[in-house]
Image (tube, rainbow, N blue to C red):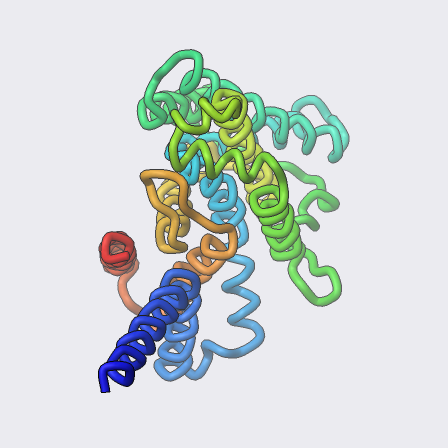
């Protein structure tokens, strides 16, 4: 009799562990599936090819920024400057084309270098400057935005290059090019984070910085590279944004993008304390935000109330993390 009771207890413990594993690994995917089902019931237009394509195109820029933010948050840091970096990198791209008549490849490279440079500065401030990530990137957010505003006199820089505009507006094999760029960036970020020594070191530093240092891991190098990756992804996002409109608005481009990126990463299961997070989780977090915004638009819900819904979801995601 006692053996039977013991076996039942073991079975229940095993089921509980299995459930906890599924919840920890796939809860964000389950949430996305549930949201898609609800959205398809509420609106007959949701599951159309046109609408799904529109969602993927809309989330591509914030999605790319979220990939870089994932690296920084796993590290235990944060980057509030990505929206402003996007605006400044976009200003460099458009100004180099319009004012200095550089070729498209050269202007893109200059924009990417701008993002990398700002990421490097952020990393140096956090490591050698010993400034907290929040303050360092908050300062950089102000600096980058101000430089963009100063160059364009708080206006917009518009180009006339139709070839450049194809990056943000054309299709390849029936798929929007911004979506293809997003998918490629997801794959690259996944490989770096999950399949390289650097990725393992990033988790080690985020989980326990002192233990990582004692294990001969170069904490400063890992940190600086993480912020450079974040700056790079912001610059990639600027290329999509500027090519889609063939212009950059220095006052509005990238506004609040950093908050959407942070929200996507947190919803995806990352912890602001560091040491936890996955690229696939971030991808699902981005899609949840995209599906949610699209559904509310289809239902004609006021844009002023959409922020309330996003905020509630972020709070719920953090509370579920505490439960775990």
Where's residue 38, x and y in %? 36, 78
The quadrant the C terminus occupies is bottom left
Left or right of 164? Residue 73 is left
Residue 238 location, quadrant:
top right
The quadrant the N terminus occupies is bottom left
Residue 41 location, quadrant:
bottom left
- Residue at 39% of width from left, 59% of height from top? 289
Residue 91 location, quadrant:
top right
- Residue at 61% of width from left, 40% of height from top? 239
Left or right of 150? Residue 157 is right
Left or right of 320? Residue 259 is right
- Residue at 70% of width from left, 43% of height from top? 164
Q: Residue furthest top?
A: 129
Using the rendered image of the protein, determine whether residue 129 is visible from the camera's viewpoint.
yes
Q: Is residue 195 above or below residue 313?
A: above
Where's residue 115, x and y in %? 56, 28
Report the front residue among 33 and 208: 208
Using the rendered image of the protein, determine whether residue 152 is visible from the camera's viewpoint.
no
Report the front residue among 210 and 280: 210
Where's residue 34, x and y in %? 38, 75
Q: Is residue 71 above or below residue 100?
A: below
- Residue at 38% of width from left, 25% of height from top? 210
Report the front residue among 34 and 178: 34
Q: Residue furthest bottom?
A: 1
Q: How many callouts does the rendering have?
A: 0
Where's residue 208, x and y in %? 38, 32
């Amino acid at each position: 009799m006692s053996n039977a009771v013991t076996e039942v207890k073991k079975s229940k413990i095993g089921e509980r562990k299995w459930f906890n594993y599924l919840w920890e690994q796939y809860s964000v995917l389950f949430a996305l599936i549930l949201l898609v089902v609800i959205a398809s019931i509420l609106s007959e237009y949701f599951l159309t090819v046109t609408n799904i394509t529109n969602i993927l195109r809309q989330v591509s820029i914030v999605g790319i920024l979220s990939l870089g933010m994932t690296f920084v948050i796993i590290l235990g840091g944060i980057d509030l400057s990505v929206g402003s970096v996007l605006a400044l990198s976009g200003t460099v791209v458009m100004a180099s084309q319009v004012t200095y008549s550089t070729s498209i490849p050269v202007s893109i490279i200059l924009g990417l270098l701008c993002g990398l440079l700002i990421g490097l500065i952020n990393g140096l401030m956090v490591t050698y400057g010993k400034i907290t990530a929040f303050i360092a990137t908050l300062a950089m957010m102000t600096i980058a935005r101000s430089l963009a505003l100063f160059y364009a006199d708080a206006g917009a820089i518009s180009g006339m290059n139709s070839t450049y505009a194809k990056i943000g507006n054309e299709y390849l094999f029936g798929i929007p090019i911004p979506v293809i760029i997003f998918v490629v960036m997801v794959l690259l970020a996944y490989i770096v984070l999950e399949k390289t020594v650097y990725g393992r070191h990033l988790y080690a530093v985020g989980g326990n910085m002192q233990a990582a240092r004692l294990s001969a891991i170069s904490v400063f190098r890992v940190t600086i590279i993480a912020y450079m990756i974040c700056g790079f992804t912001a610059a990639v996002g600027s290329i999509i944004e500027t090519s889609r409109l063939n212009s950059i608005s220095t006052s509005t481009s990238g506004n609040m993008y950093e908050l959407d990126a942070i929200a996507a990463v947190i919803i995806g299961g990352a912890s602001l304390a560091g040491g936890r997070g996955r690229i696939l989780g971030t991808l699902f977090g981005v899609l949840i935000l995209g599906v949610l915004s699209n559904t509310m638009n289809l239902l004609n819900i006021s844009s002023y109330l959409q922020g309330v819904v996003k905020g509630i979801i972020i709070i719920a995601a953090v509370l579920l993390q505490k439960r775990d």
